[in-house]
């Protein structure tokens, strides 16, 4: 059979019919629609990001506006309430009452030897003034109130521990309450301590002699006061130094 393409020297051209043109037009419209949807998605995405950034900024305003003052800054802070800043006063934090006095180092000319009279302990609420003896041995406690040699001396920063018998010098110690005073007088000055805590611990409790970060006077005696024999507990009063003369 004769091939009609042979007279043209190559393959014959195919002319698109009506159905093919409709298919191409539909494809073009779908392509344009997809382009429009893509552009709309980009615009919508940019809008969402912008909205999120604006909200994050709005929520961060209170935290940015609030400033905690340093010790050298003014005692006011700016606080954002409903978008409008206001100024509020910040009270100064009170320092420990013994901090300025504890900063002054108390120096004794020499360390006392066991049995030496170190000074006196006055208890205004009981009307007593008692000698303080260096050491807590049996002979020392017969003379007065004993100073525990492994603790600091009266007036110094840390825990100064005094002990006495419950049936002699400290027989009325149970009458004291928080707020009452101990006044210690030594060659270096007069130290005023205020009772802050009263507690009862076992005789083997070592928390009585733990170090402290400020000047403290710890006064102890055996407990119960009217116990017959070797008492199992200790009556402990802790007092902070509040004045120095």
Image (tube, helix red, strand yellow):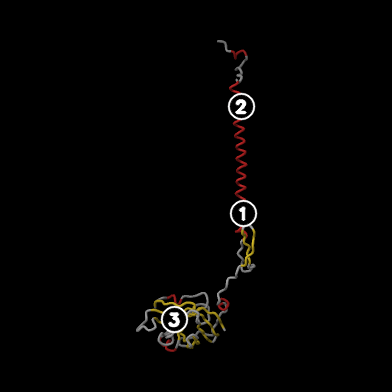
Q: Residues within 10 Å of mark 3 (few under 14, many from 20)?
A: many
Q: Residue 10 has which mark?
A: none
Q: Secondary structure at mark 3?
A: strand
Q: Residues within 10 Å of mark 1 (few under 14, many from 20)?
A: few
In percent of width and height, residue 4 lies at 59, 13
Q: What residue appears at the point 40 percent right and 86 percent down from the top-left corner?
A: 167
- In the image shown, does 31 or 150 lie closer to the viewer? 31
Indicate which label's residue lies in the foreground, 2 or 3.
2
| Among the two numbered marks 2 and 3 on one chain, the one whose residue lies closer to the N terminus | 2
39 is higher (above) or lower (below) than 150:
above
86 is higher (above) or lower (below) than 130:
above
Q: On the image, which quarter does residue 28 sit in?
A: top right
Label 2 to label 1, Cα distance in Å? 50 Å
If the image is split into quadrants, where does the N terminus sit?
A: top right
Q: Secondary structure at mark 1?
A: helix
In percent of width and height, residue 99 lies at 56, 76
Q: On the image, which quarter does residue 23 sit in?
A: top right
How many numbered marks does the figure carry?
3
Q: Secondary structure at mark 2?
A: helix
Whether label 2 touches label 1, CB < 8 Å: no
| Among the two numbered marks 1 and 3 on one chain, the one whose residue lies closer to the N terminus | 1
- Circle 3 is placed at which residue position? 220
Q: Residue 25 has which mark?
A: 2
| Among the two numbered marks 2 and 1 on one chain, the one whose residue lies closer to the N terminus | 2
In percent of width and height, residue 221 lies at 42, 82
Q: On the image, which quarter does residue 19 sit in?
A: top right
- Circle 1 is placed at which residue position? 58
């Amino acid at each position: 059979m004769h091939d009609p393409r042979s007279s043209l020297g190559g393959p014959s051209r195919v002319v698109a019919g009506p159905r093919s043109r409709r298919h191409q037009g539909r494809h073009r419209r779908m392509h344009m629609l997809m382009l429009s949807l893509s552009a709309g998605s980009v615009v919508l995405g940019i809008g969402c990001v912008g909205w999120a950034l604006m909200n994050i900024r709005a929520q961060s305003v209170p935290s940015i506006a609030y400033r905690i003052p340093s010790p050298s800054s003014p005692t006011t802070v700016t606080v954002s309430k409903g978008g409008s800043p206001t100024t509020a006063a910040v009270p100064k934090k009170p320092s420990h009452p013994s901090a300025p006095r504890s900063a002054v180092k108390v120096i004794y000319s020499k360390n006392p030897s066991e049995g030496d009279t170190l000074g006196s302990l006055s208890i205004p609420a009981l009307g007593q003034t008692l000698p303080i003896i260096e050491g807590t041995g049996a002979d020392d406690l017969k003379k007065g109130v004993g100073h525990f040699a492994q603790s600091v001396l009266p007036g110094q920063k840390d825990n100064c521990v005094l002990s006495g018998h419950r049936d002699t010098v400290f027989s009325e110690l149970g009458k004291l309450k928080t707020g009452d005073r101990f006044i210690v007088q030594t060659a270096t000055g007069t130290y005023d301590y205020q009772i802050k805590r009263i507690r009862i611990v076992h005789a083997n409790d070592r928390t009585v002699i733990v170090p402290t970060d400020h000047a403290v006077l710890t006064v102890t005696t055996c407990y119960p006061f009217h116990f017959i024999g070797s008492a199992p507990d200790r009556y402990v009063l802790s007092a902070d130094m509040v004045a120095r003369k």
